[in-house]
Image (cartoon, rainbow, N blue to C red):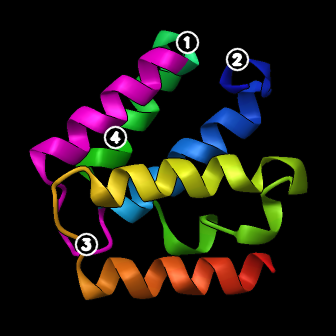
Amino acid sequence: MLNEIDRATRLELMKFVCSFAWADLSVHPAERSFVGRLVSRLGFEPDDEARVREWLRVPPDPESVDPTRIPREHRQLFLAAIDGVIAADGQITSEERESLALLKELMA
């Protein structure tokens, strides 16, 4: 299913994943590793990989992370990837939990 989504949607997915990695104001090494594996699975071109690495260095602008831009048919995929990154370090903070609850509410 990951290979079937277009480039723009894959980038949007990674923007959301990276923004959730930053939900507790730091990116844990396990979260970075999760993002790296996901980038590999998505088969990004070098320019897009660099963009994702930048989102791990500096969080995406909150205004650019818009749940209404998530295609309805990919919402479960986005939620699964976000669940993966926030659980990657073995602990889900209250900030991560609240952000995920808000995203689910906005997507409903």
Q: Nearer the viewer, mark 4 or mark 3?
A: 3
Which residue carries the number 4 mark? 54
What secondary structure is marked by label 4? Answer: helix
Residue at point 74%, 39% (across, down): 9
CA–CA distance in space, label 1 to label 2: 8 Å
Q: Are marks 3 and 1 in contact (CB under 8 Å)?
A: no
Relative side of 85 to 69, left or right: left
Q: Which residue is mark 2?
A: 3
Q: Over which residues does the magenta segment extend?
A: 22-41
Q: Which circle, 3 or 1, is nearer the viewer? A: 3
What's under tag 2, amino acid-wise?
Asn
Q: Earlier in the sequence, mark 4 or mark 3?
A: 4
Which element is circle 1 on?
loop
Residue 66 sits above or below residue 104 on the image = above
Q: Amino acid at mark 4?
A: Glu
**Where is the N terminus found, in terms of image quarters?**
top right
